[in-house]
Image (spheres, rainbow, N blue to C red):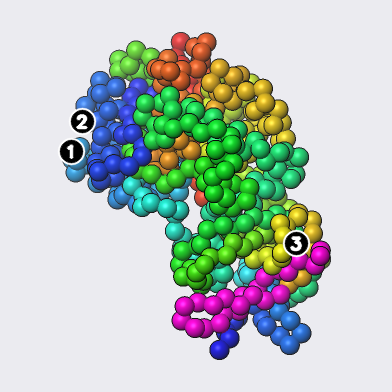
Amino acid sequence: MSGVAIVGVGLSPFGRSSMSGLQQGAVAVRAALEDAGLQWTDIQCAYGGSQDAGNADALANLLGHTGIHFTNIWNGCATGGSAISAAANAIRAGEADIALAVGFDKHPRGAFAAKPSDWGIGDWYGESGLMLTTQFFGMKINRYLHDHALDPSILAQVSRKAYANGAITPHAWRQQTFTEADINQSDMLSYPLRKLMFCSPAEGGAAIILCRSSLAKDFHSTPITLRASVVRGREFGSFEVFSPSLPTARGRSATEIASVAAFEQAGVGPGDIDVAQLQDTEAGAEIIHLAENGFCEHGEQGEWLKQGHTEIGGKLPVNTDGGCIANGEPVGASGLRQVIEVCWQLRGQGGRRQVPCQPRLGYTQVYGAPGISGVNILERAR
Amino acid sequence: MTICIDDSILDITNSGPVLRASRCRACGHDSFPVSERCQRCMAEEIEPLAIVGRAQLWTWTSQDFCPKSPYLECDKKPFESYYVGYLNPLNTSVLIESRLLQPGQPVIGDLYELTTLNLLPENGAVVTTFAYRSIAI
């Protein structure tokens, strides 16, 4: 994907805040503008989304009404992926030279509540005690571990890494480390997944400023080139949340489809990637996504974790800021946090969690229900 | 008084519960609940499919905290953990999500039998839904 670079990133730290969701979005946008040395009046079009905290275009009330086209985006947990992809496409299409992707959210505590009718499902499904995302994640990873002869102990290994990375990330929500024993003693929620293996709904904002690559050096000393930005849906038969039934024949997941398309667009392969952010709604998702994004074979994850490949300093550091597990998931902002962390790593701004040896190529994958995946491949401009 | 949770998905007959599903005449894909069009090939030639009897467990998990409303027993105390899973009814091409009834931890591949489960909401009603009971023991 030629011609688009990231020149400004900004975060309103995830967790709990006294600010409204929109205010957290505005904090993120102002931080991204400062990072790029730009003013709000320089932004020529914007794409943004939020699940529970209002319309993204209402950010203009806080930032200024400048007459730009501000498109509201909604793709579940993949909203951030869709926003950045749309902003990049606006630049590619010649609609703008400088564009904004923003997301923010403010969720109530506890698991997301879902109404069957919103999903085209009869009330009987929720009434029978079947409509819980936690059950879906438990059933998906339980079958995956069975199919690929993986030991459930790898789930605590993934969680331990997430908290360890969060503890050295100043803006992470979860700053406490946990041992694998701590994790395995936390409450079982949906076998084999325990409380400390799940991310929680949270609050926060994230903003990214993109521009035409030819302008990038005007705004930032280390622009990050967007080599690929792809959002894809699923094939019939993929195993998705809130399915009263599934066909016996499995189809390819949205992540498998998006990943292949992104590597093709970027002209690089999984072995070229130096640092990655993979959707870790719970520990099992990171396990599955390692293989679905092509970084290892299905079933190889046990050996990967044993060798420490996904640790900071390993051959493919994954979720260096602690991912969703340590940062929580403000749905609208989550996919953009992933991209921001990879930008910081590629710029060498990772602080205590900095990946060594000057990473050049980074990868992000965000996944949303019911089967949407957004993949970005980023490169430090030479 | 006992009522069926939804008679468009579940028929409680004298010889036992029947799940109302559908089969595509064009491609053979099975859907539950009944689908007006085939979800795989979008054909409109759909015939009813009655799902009864045995099924094989494809995956499972536990529900170890009390679900919020609209779960009919969301106010029942104390909460008792339960199992759910996807099962493949024999001679079908579909996996059905269901409550599981059994004493111990489920095992993928085990055989189950379609049965009913009465849920007892606070209002005193008895609502019958479907479930699968382990026959491995």
Which region shows up in magenta? B115-137
Residue A279's disc number? none
Inspect the image, locate mark 3, and give the three-letter code of the amino acid beneath it.
Asn
Q: Would you say residue A275 sits in the magenta stretch?
A: no
SS for tag 3? strand
Residue A41's disc number? 2
Name the residue: 45% across, 35% down: A326
**Residue A219 occupies which quadrant of the picture?**
top left
Label 2 in the same subunit as label 3: no
Inspect the image, locate mark 2, and give the three-letter code of the amino acid beneath it.
Thr
Between discs 2 and 1, the one toward the N terminus: 2
SS for tag 1? loop
Pointer 2 indicates a residue of which chain? Answer: A
Q: Would you say residue B125 sits in the magenta stretch?
A: yes
Residue B88's disc number? 3
Do tag 2 and tag 1 residues touch (Cβ < 8 Å)?
yes
Label 2 in the same subunit as label 1: yes
Q: Dot 1, how many residues are within 10 Å of its Cα: few (below 14), some (14-19), or many (20+)?
A: few
Residue with the mark numbered 1: A64
Pick whichever, A275 or A378, lies toward us.
A275
The picture places residue B131, in percent across and down from the top left corner, at: 67, 70
SS for tag 2? helix
**Viewer-nearest of discs 1 and 3:** 3
Name the residue: 64% across, 61% down: B83
Identify whether B103 is placed above or below A136: below
